[in-house]
Image: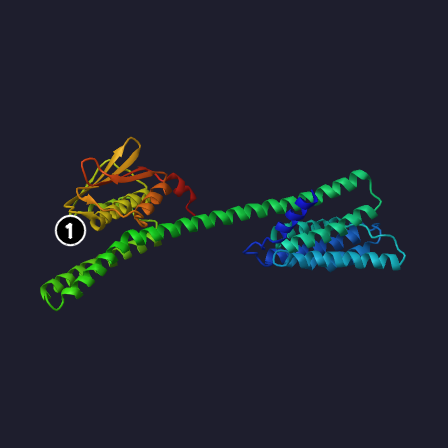
Amino acid sequence: MLTVLRSFVGSVRRLPAPPRARPAGRSDIALVAVAAVLAVVEVTLLRPDLPGRWLSLVGFLAWLPSLLVRRTRPAATALAFAAVMVVLSVVQRLGDVDPPGDLHTAVLALLIPYSLVRWASGADAVSGLALFLLVAGSSLVAQDLAAGDRLGGAAVLVAATMTGLALRARAMLHTRQLEDVRRLERERLARDLHDTVAHHLTAIAISAQAGLAVAETRPAAAREALRRIDEEATRTLAETRSVVRMLRTDDDPARRPLDDLTAMAAAAGPGPAVEVVVADDLDLSPTVAATVQRIAQESVANARRHATDVTSVRVQVARKLDLVELTVTDDGRSAMPADRGFGILGMTERAELVGGRLSAGPAVGGGWKVVALLPSRDRELDRRRP
């Protein structure tokens, strides 16, 4: 049991301080100022018979300003409170006076354990909380209080601590969700760059190598290679701008990605003919529509790169009950490498991100076939979008 407790405390001590701790503002300064005025009113007007009232007031006013750094330096707040309490105890004993009574305004001290578990690093939270509880517990024991009052005071301390702990856990969960969203966006960016740019760059590199090989013996072939490089570079620039535009704004109409998909037939260029058939009764979210377009584009690029003797590629998007089905087939002899790179893996992950599934393999009768079955509305990612 002791080993488990030691391990738990050790793991807590390694926790970093939560980010974005807000420094003291006008509301914090107002809180401290109002509390100081209320303490003076309490001592002078409301509770003139409070034992050691002036000593209590001085002690309260001494540690009260430390609340201004309770978020940025919560351990300093706890240390200031403990130091003042120790000094008051020493003064009370040396002066041989009655123990100072507790001010009602001093309930603000509950902000100290709350701030420690909410804003401090793990090491500062453990040390500061132990120090505060030692001082507060000693005060509860030293005072002439009924058992119920002591129990109630301890319960209030625990409640303040647990409130801070709960809010810290909630903030940590929110931070984790934001990190997940950022990770998903980075994965989308990586796939978009691969799907829209990588295959164009591959074509540019191949055309450049071919042009260099025949530049001296076949100038016409070299000029044709340069023309292909120019076409691929133009497409790469257009696709890159499209990706950047899609990443920078969410106000694009849902039909635009499918309009781009339809344009693939006209933009096929050299190589196999590309036929695109898109149903008219589709109502897709922007994310799903973009997923359909990117999977189709990568499938066509794979057919061009890896299939042999391919003459035609067919892209079909149709409704299937409440789903959308994308089918891409070619008539070539597949030469897909064993590791398949990031192409099919990226398409599969992209489909899974929107709650769909993807299969790819040899088609019946020859060729290669890619089938993606996707929900028409991307409920999961739409819900998690910040």
- 106 sits to left or right of 7: right
Q: Give the vertical position of 227 relative to 354 (above or below).
A: below
The image position of residue 229, as x and y in percent, is 19, 61
Say which of 217 and 98 sits in front: 217
User: Residue lying farthest bottom?
Assistant: 216
Look at the image and name its color scheme: rainbow
Q: Quadrant of the N terminus?
A: top right
The image position of residue 178, as x and y in percent, is 47, 49
User: Residue lying farthest top?
Assistant: 321
- 97 sits to left or right of 219: right
Q: Amino acid at mark 1?
A: Gly
Residue depicted at x 16% and y 49%: 266
Residue depicted at x 68% and y 57%: 77
- Mark 1, residue position: 271
Asked if one can make out residue 53 in the rendered structure from this viewpoint, the answer is yes
Disc 1, SS: loop
The image position of residue 62, as x and y in percent, is 74, 60
Quarter of image, res 154:
top right
Residue depicted at x 30% and y 53%: 194
Residue depicted at x 14% and y 67%: 215
